[in-house]
Image (cartoon, rainbow, N blue to C red):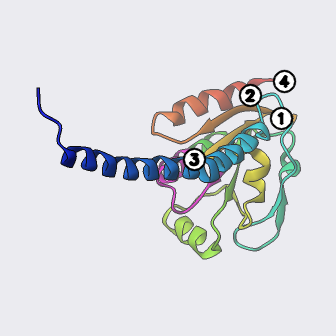
Amino acid sequence: MWPVTVQDVRQLALWRLPLRALLITRFLIGFFVVLPLSLVVASAATSAVRIGEEVPSVSLPNIMGANEVSLSSLRGNVVYVDFWASWCSPCRLSFPQLEALHREFNTRGFEVFAISVDREIADARGFLEEMPVSYTVLHDDQASTPRNFGVLGMPTGYLIDKSGTVRWVHAGFKKSDGLVLRDQILKLIEEN
């Protein structure tokens, strides 16, 4: 057994002070930072568009500035609404696959409705110069549309049937997701 000296007791008392400060700091950060952020995430999750619900109304400017486009104008088609940003790495995987799907199924009533959430339209246009697509690309610099949908990350896609009902929601993107998405699109195209 080790003998305890007065010096040891003083050192022990000094260790308690930083520990208390650390615990108080962690509590304050948790209470004033983490709790409010979790409430924001929870409110976004509760306001999220869910499978089986009607898609919210969307009307945004074309990224080339030509005109405003409305999602309701595509009713009667199967539509994939894709939220993306120029800084999103998985979006670089999704864009070529969405383009291939659009080219394959466009004549059968399939449309892609890609919505950029970049604050600067020049960033989105730069991305499109590297990854050109033939489908509709819109711009929402205020990010109001992803808030209405409850989007929490990029990319996030919503597959909508011909009647305007969300039938499939997908967050993120990896190479194998293209085949899964293709199967989902084909099912909806073949529905009456």
Residue 25 belongs to magenta span: no
Name the residue rendered at 21%, 46% in the picture: 6
Q: CA distance from mark 3 to mark 4?
A: 51 Å
Q: Which corner quadrant holds the C terminus?
A: top right
Disc 1 to disc 3, C-alpha distance: 45 Å
Give percent across and percent down for residue 7. 19, 49
Question: Are there few (<14), some (14-19), or many (20+) residues within 10 Å of tag 3?
Answer: few
CA distance separating discs 2 and 4:
8 Å
List the residue tagged with mark 1.
162
The percent coordinates of residue 50 (x first, y second) are 77, 33
Front one among 156 and 150: 150
Gap between marks 2 and 1 measured at Cα: 8 Å
Q: For residue 30, which numbered disc appears in the image? A: 3
Local secondary structure at mark 2: helix
Residue 84 part of the magenta-drawn span? yes
Q: Which residue is mark 2?
A: 188
Instruction: Please provide percent x and percent y for residue 183.
Output: 61, 27
Q: Nearer the viewer, residue 131 or 11?
A: 11
Q: Which residues are magenta?
A: 83-98
Say what amino acid the circle numbered 3 marks.
Answer: Gly
Circle 4 — which element?
loop
Q: Amino acid at mark 4?
A: Asn
User: Which label belongs to residue 192?
Assistant: 4
Q: Are marks 2 and 1 in contact (CB under 8 Å)?
A: yes
| Prevailing secondary structure class for the magenta stretch in the rendered image | helix
Residue 103 visible (yes or no): yes
